[in-house]
Every structure is written in C-alpha cells, then in structure tokens.
Image (cartoon, rainbow, N blue to C red):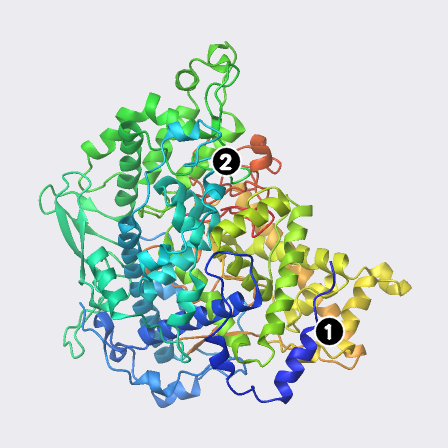
Amino acid sequence: MSAPPSYQDAEAAAATSEPPPGLAESFATLSLATTPRDPDPDTCLAHLRLLSAFESLREDVGYTDGLWGLWDTRAPAETEKDHAKEPVAKASQQKVPDEKKGKEPTSKASQSKFPSEKQAKEPAPNAPQTEVPNERHLQLSKIREKRWALFVARAADRYETWWKGLVEGPALTEDDMNSQTSTAYALFPISQNTQDSKYWGKTSLPPLDVLMVYHAHMLNPYNFLEDCVRAGYGQLWANGMPWNLVNAAIDQSFNYNVSDEDKARWIAMTGRAWDNVEDPLVKSVPCPVCVNHIEIPWTTCGLDENSKTDHDPGLIGSGYGDGELNASCNKCGTRINKEFLSVAKFCNDARDLLVKNLPMPGTVLNPVSGEPEGFEPRYAQPWNPQTFPNRMIRLVLRIDIQDLIKSPRLAHPPTVDDVRKMVEDVLSSQSALRTIEQGSPTGRTLRTIRATPIARLSVRKMMSRYWDNFSPFALDLGGAVLRQGIFSEKMQKIDWLHSPTARDTMTRLITKYQRFVSIIAENPKRIAVPTLDVDLAWHTHQLSPSAYYAYTIAATKKFIRHDDKVDEDGLRDGFEWTSKTYQEKFGQVYSECTCWYCESVRTSHISSIGKVLGISSNEKIDEKFHTSGVANLCPPDNSAHISSHNAVKLDLSGETKADAVRRYAQDAHQRRLEESYQKACKRAEKKGRKLPPREQYYDHWGYSYYMYGPWMYPMYFTPGMYYAAPGYAGAGGGGCAAGSCGGGVAAGACGSPGGCAAGGCGGGAGAGGGGCGGGGGGGGGCGGGGGGCGGGGGS
C-alpha cells in the first residue's frame, strides 16, 4: 500500500493562505451517493458538517439559562478572591462565547456506587498545585452539563419512539436462526443490498436530537446489527445515514433545517413534538407489577429563577432523566428505580421468548465472529450453543423469572444482581445443565457437564444487555451519545472543515484508516486503537452499516467492532502497541502530534541498543518527523493523536485480587511512561528542541479541567448527573455470572474477535484464566484489558 500524502503541504497551505472564496458553499454541494458506500473525502466532509451541527446544538442547550429550571444564578457569585483563584489560561482553552452567556431560556421546566458531586470536585491526583478551581466557573460547568444530560436522556427516549414507529419486520424468531438461508437472519446483512432508494423519502429525516442518537447507535456496529436483526429492520440497516439529505439540511452556519412537511410527518408518526424541549416535562412509565401508568418528572433538580427556598435539590435528582430515579406506583406501592426497570426489561424479553419465540438479546450474533450464522441441527449438536441462554430460560428459569415481578419487594425491588445469582445457580447445577442439554450426547453422558465456551460467552453477552440499561436496545444510547460528543468536540477544535486543503486531508486519513484495518487483520487478538484522523474515517464508514460490514468481513474475515466503552488503561496500552506496529510496518509515525504523551510513546519505541549503534529505524523515523518540518505543523494542543472518546473508568468497588494486580500494572506503566518522557526530553534537548509541559487543561463549559494524559476518561463526567454514567464501567465483583467466564473462552477472550463484549471479563478472562470482573456498565466494554477498539474487540 502506498504512503498517504503528507499533511505538511495541506497544513502549510492553511497557514499561509486565506480560505478560498466559496469554501463553505462548496461543502453544501458535496458529491454524495444516495446509497451506502465505503468512505470517500466528500462523505467524511459531510460527516464533519453533521458533527458541527451536533456541537452547535450542544452549545445552544447547555448555555440556555433556565432550561428545565436550571438557572445560572444557582452558581455562587464571583468575588475578587475568585479572580485570584482563576486557573492559568492555556492556549488550548476555548472561552465561552459572549453571545452564549446571556441566552434567554427556551423553557421553564420543571446510595450511588459512583463518586458524588463533592468527590468529583476534588482535583486530580497529579494536578499541579498552582491551579486553584474557581468555584463559580466549576458550578456553572456542572449546571450546563446537567442541562445537556437531560436533553440527551430525552433525545434517547424520543429515538425509541421513532424506532418503534418504523414499519418493517417481522421480528426475528429462533426458527429463523436454525437456517443458513434465512434472509431474516443468516443472509440479513447482505440480502438487503438492494436498497430502497426511496426509503428515506418515505421515512423522512427525524429532528437533529434524534438523528444524533441514531448516529451514536450506528457507531456501535455490533449492537446496531443485533438490534436491526431482532426488529427485522433490514432497510434501515441497508440504507444507513442518508448523507445527501442530511448534508442538504445543514446550512453554512451548521443549523439543521427540514421542510414543514417533514416536521408534520414526524409529529404524525411519533406523537412527539419536533423540538425536544417542547415535549412533556413528565414521562409516563407502566408499573412493572400492575401495569398502572406512573407520571414521573424528567428531573427533580429544577427551581424557579427567584426561588426563596433554602433547599437546594442539587444536580443528581430522582426524576426519570436524573441520576437516581426514585418513584412509587400510586396503585400497588412498588418502588420504581433504574435497577427494577432493567429487571422488568429482562422479564419482558423472557416473556417474548416463551410466548413469541423471540431470542434474548445477546444471543443473536455469533459471539466470536459477530455475524448472524445460521445453525443446522445435527445429532452430535442438536442445539446451537449460542442460544444456550434461551434454553436456560425456557427449561429451567421460566417460573423464577415470573416470580421476580409477581412477588415484588415493595421497599427493595429486585435488581439485575438477583438475575445474575439465578443464572449462577443454573451454571453450577449439574441437574439444571442436564435439563438444558437434554437430547444431546452431552446431556446423556454421566460425566460432569459444563457449559461450552460459546454458551458461557453468550450468557455474558445476554447479561450485559441489562446492566444499567432499561432501554429496548443492546446498550444505553444516552451514554453512547455523551461519549461520542467528546469526539465531536475534538473534531470541532481541529477544524478541518475550514482548511482550504480539507479534501486532501480527508484523502490522507482514509488511506491511513485502510492501513489501520490491515493491522487489525494481521493481529486479530490485539487491541488496535485509532488516532483522531483514523477514527473519523472509521466512524464515517460505520454510518453506512451494510458497506462497513461487507468491507470488514472481506478484509479481516470478521465483523470489526468499535467498542463504545474501553477501560482507559486498555486503551492506553492498545494505542502504544498500535503506534509501534504502524511505525514499523509503514515507516511513518502513527500519531502526528507533539504533545508530551505522543513524544514519550515514540521514544519508547526506540531500542537502547539500536540507538547506541545508530541503527534504530524507529529513531530515524521520529527524527525525520521533526527535521522535515511536519512536526512544526502539529501543535501539541490541537493535533490528531489518540482517540479516546470511548475511554471509561472502572468502578473498583468490591476490589478483588485481580484489581490489586491491575493497580500494580498501572503503577509499573506510570514508571515506564515517566522514563520515556525523561528520555524524550533529553533527546529533544540535544536536538535543540523543547518538549511541551505535561500539564494539560481541557475546557468544559468554560471551566478548565486538568487531565494527566490524553487516554483518560473525561474527569468532568460527574456520574450522578446522568441516568446512566457515561464514563464508568463495572469492574468489581458481581458483574458477570460466576461460571460464565474462565480460561476456556478461547476465541471469545478479551481483545480477540469476540471480545468480552459489553460486560465481559474484568480480569482478563479467557486470556489465560482470570475471573470475571464487571458487567460493563450500560452495555459497556471489557474491564482489565478487554473490550478492544478494533482488533475485533468487544461490542
């Protein structure tokens, strides 16, 4: 594969020339196909325009004072003392636009395992002591984030209504899965290739907030395929993002406008308002026990602007879109919280399995390849191991599951942990396993029976669909939107759209993406982590799901997944490996960035012996990057280095021995990184260069947050604000059912083609043993080196 063109010429032109006249206008008339295809420069540019529209929407919502009763006046007044505490301004900081500060309100609405708001205010362990937080700016940033969090929660709910209103189907049944020629299953990804070119004309574009959730859903390709197959949404899968219509709806100021006819069709189809903020301030929820509908406010955090009450409701709240939902049924008295709603989702899915023969979530796709593979029963294996959870529910757990809802504990309703314990009992019971395997040679043997590796992996996948997720989808889409928003912010900051050589840049990053996929193909059991430029092409490709599926199957023999939640340590380690592999394979630096971290990573690739002998190829590559002048065009605070929007922090409550080992590995890596940084400083000094400082500050709603490294999850995610914590994943005990993990997971191990997808192993199960860690909060990824971002990693 030939080398991609250098960024140098493009960026140099940008630095010395004014943008050509009509640049923005030309982007409004991009050459976009009406059917899905592999990424090209125009599609990538259309994607950047859509991300800019999302960013504009986010700013509009966050800075709308008074939205849902969240007023800026709740932040403490600024004093002269606060001015003395003002954080030191950094070149990378983006100041709050003056026009946003005084925006008029659009609407006057009405024990956690995660850190509290108070804990979240504490500075990072390695933060420089010279930076003292400004309390008013900190509180304003949290108020603005809360407005956006509520907006996103409502958007996910509106997307669910839109999804259910799509007319396709019928829904997948287990009978469909027992055929290798079923267009509803085995041939689903490819049988839809005859796209209905009028599909989006008949469906019409949804509001921008709903389109944003659809965008995040497709950027979890494994989960999106599962949801489409289960619902029978072949044309939605086949058509993907309608780039020609979306691009036409975005004007030069990145406002999203559709016709009045499209708005009317949306309202008629969904019964919802076109504007998110015009929807009701309460959510009608059926009680899982008596089916009585309960009216639950979206938030309990709102106050009147001039409220005289001494009670501050805080920013966590107990509403439907808040961090700690807490309501009671006014008919049967059952307490309604998120855990109970997740259990209700599991019970409803089990009922659909028993009554309608609809397979459980997590049992639809092959857990190793990610494909819908039809199963032909035979004497040696009459049952598909992939559907083990379905048989377990049918033959063993059907009564126990019904009792979860029929006999509620009014003060302490059942949780997903109760479901996990039920599954554990089955996996540890020989009589139960014989019942499940009846009719097969395994069921007739007198030897000890154990669920197969594929069966155990399917159990983990099924359970992951319910951890912190009570939506009908395979993952919590509200959290997915918030994590994708990090990527959108970074694209906005790099601002390729306003470069006169934008198309050349897109061409280059597409080539780099193709190289990235080749690394995944050659290293199927490693975690490959993209840079921001690679990730733009990767995301753009995933937004044409059928084209992406065909491309990755042809290139790698498996459906590559882009995990939405990856432990920040696994992400960091994977990036360092990818950087070294890319550099050695293609003879160019991978991350064209001059921040302290990227400089340290490149230095770590240099062999000490090779350096002494003057034969280190990695040193020559790095030196060429600097002497050619390319490095001068890659500022440390605004370059395409590691893409970490999917980084999450593991919740280490209930710490195990595996967690202690993990902490030791973190400390060891920290020491190695420090050594590499010191070496990079010495190398730079000898060459007459100076490395940038390690202190990095990231602007969030006008407040500067310190972040030790670019691979880390966003420190500004205060978990209690969200109805599902976007920056955390479970890693303590109790995440998976005991007996569903172990060294025999084989190809489904962490970081391999199947990954411990969305709630798999915490301590490296399958990659040499190790127990099971977390449930992957909210459909999250693997803990402890699992998940994978590429490399066939988790879903």
In screen coordinates, is 76 left or right of 682? left
Per the rendering, the mark at residue 177 is none
Q: Give the x, y percent position of residue 246.
A: 40, 66
Occupied quadrant, residue 390 = top left
Q: Three-letter amino acid code at disc 2?
A: Asn
Please state which of residues 704 and 510 is positioned toward the viewer in this rendering.
Answer: 510
Between label 1 and label 2, give the one nearer the viewer: 2
**Is residue 730 placed above or below 444 in the rendered structure?**
below
Q: Would you call the spot at circle 1 few (<14 residues within 10 Å), some (14-19), or many (20 or more)?
A: many
Report the Cα–Cα distance between label 1 and label 2: 48 Å
Q: Give the x, y percent position of residue 207.
A: 31, 65
Tell me whether the residue at label 1 lies in contact with that at label 2, contact meaning CB atoms closer than 8 angstroms: no
Q: Three-letter amino acid code at disc 1?
A: Cys
Please state which of residues 509 and 285 is positioned toward the viewer in this rendering.
Answer: 509
In screen coordinates, is 524 left or right of 423? right
User: Which residue occupies 20% across, 73% down?
Assistant: 107
Q: Earlier in the sequence, mark 1 or mark 2?
A: 2
In screen coordinates, is 582 left or right of 228? right
Quadrant of the snapshot with the N terminus: bottom right
Per the rendering, the mark at residue 366 is 2
Q: Give the x, y percent position of residue 305.
A: 18, 78
Q: Give the x, y percent position of residue 573.
A: 63, 55
Q: Residue furthest left?
A: 331
**Is residue 247 placed above or below 253 in the rendered structure?**
above
Q: Is residue 320 visible?
A: yes
Occupied quadrant, residue 108 = bottom left
Q: Which residue is mark 1?
A: 681
